[in-house]
Amino acid sequence: MGGSSRAGRKVSALLARTVLLAEAGYWLSNHVALLGLTVWVARLRHADIKIVAFDDRGNSLSSVEFFRTWRPALVVRDMNHQSRFGIQHGLGPILVAVPADETVSLELLWPVPGFGKVLVSVDNGGQGFRGAPDRSITVELVPDLARLRIRQLRRWIVAQNGGRPASPGAEDGLKLTDSVMREVERTRDLRRRNVLAYHALRAALKASEQEVLAEARDSIGGAITDRCATALDSCLAK
């Protein structure tokens, strides 16, 4: 019995060491990757976008934490929506190298409470980001993600329904996002700004889902009504 107990403890200790080594290897691999990318980026003429990022609990993210969060998708696009090079690098502030003297936007996978990872974008209010080798551009990530998603929803409503939401839920969601984003603009505390911005982003995503579903339902209903009317007209004409 004692031998079995000692063997069990040895196995447990071995498993614990294996887990610790795996975690250490994963931790180091991210650091090594970012350092290697810094060396590679240094050979290119580029501008840096400096990103200020928080998680949904208001914790500021380090470069390594940001690197882990967006993978496997961070895409830089020019204003014609063509992909350009975009590379996160370095272990200090969060830096993404982009082509110098070009106007670009960023797309990335980002976790939103209640939605998992969502492909979202930042584009500086539609103007894009344009940097030079001797200066970086600072982007406060989550408030910018929320602003663009709200604009995209409003554009959809204008294009699909003449500016009037098809869903009462989407209309309420837009009112909520407007209220929260006004508070974001008034707040100077970075942590609180980002926590609020997550709420606005989540509300905008939910409102987008509701609006798309309502538009689809109305379109299907309209098509069925049109077919019924056509069939009725055909019967009356006989």
Image (cartoon, rainbow, N blue to C red):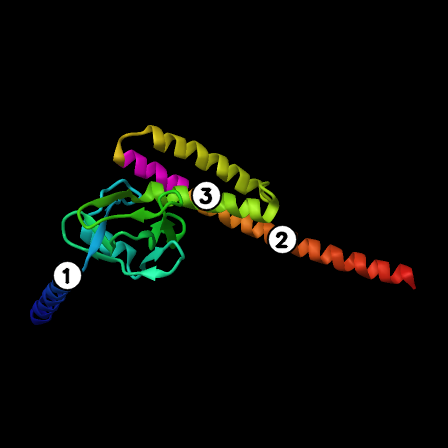
Q: Quadrant of residue 98?
A: bottom left
Residue 183 sits inside the magenta stretch: no
The kind of residue on which mark 2 rests is Arg
N-terminal-most mark, 3 or 2: 3
Mark sitting on residue 43: 1
Crowding near the residue tagged with mark 2, few <14, some 14–19, many ≥20 C-alpha atoms within 10 Å = few
- Please give the range of residues in magenta: 191-201
Q: CA distance from mark 2 to mark 1?
A: 53 Å
Give SS at disc 3: helix
Q: Quadrant of residue 73?
A: bottom left
Q: Residue furthest right?
A: 238
Relative to 93, residue 68 above or below: below
Asked if marks 2 and 1 touch (Cβ < 8 Å), the reply is no
Q: Nearer the viewer, residue 81 or 181?
A: 81
Q: Is residue 30 visible?
A: no
Asked if marks 1 and 3 touch (Cβ < 8 Å), the reply is no
Crowding near the residue tagged with mark 3, few <14, some 14–19, many ≥20 C-alpha atoms within 10 Å = some
Q: Is residue 197 visible?
A: yes
Residue 182 in picture, x, y percent from top left: 40, 31
Instruction: Identify the residue under disc 3.
Output: 151
The kind of residue on which mark 1 rests is Arg
Instruction: Identify the residue under disc 2.
Output: 217
Residue 228 in picture, x, y percent from top left: 78, 58
Relative placement, left or right, of 156 versus 119 is: right
What is the count of numbered marks?
A: 3
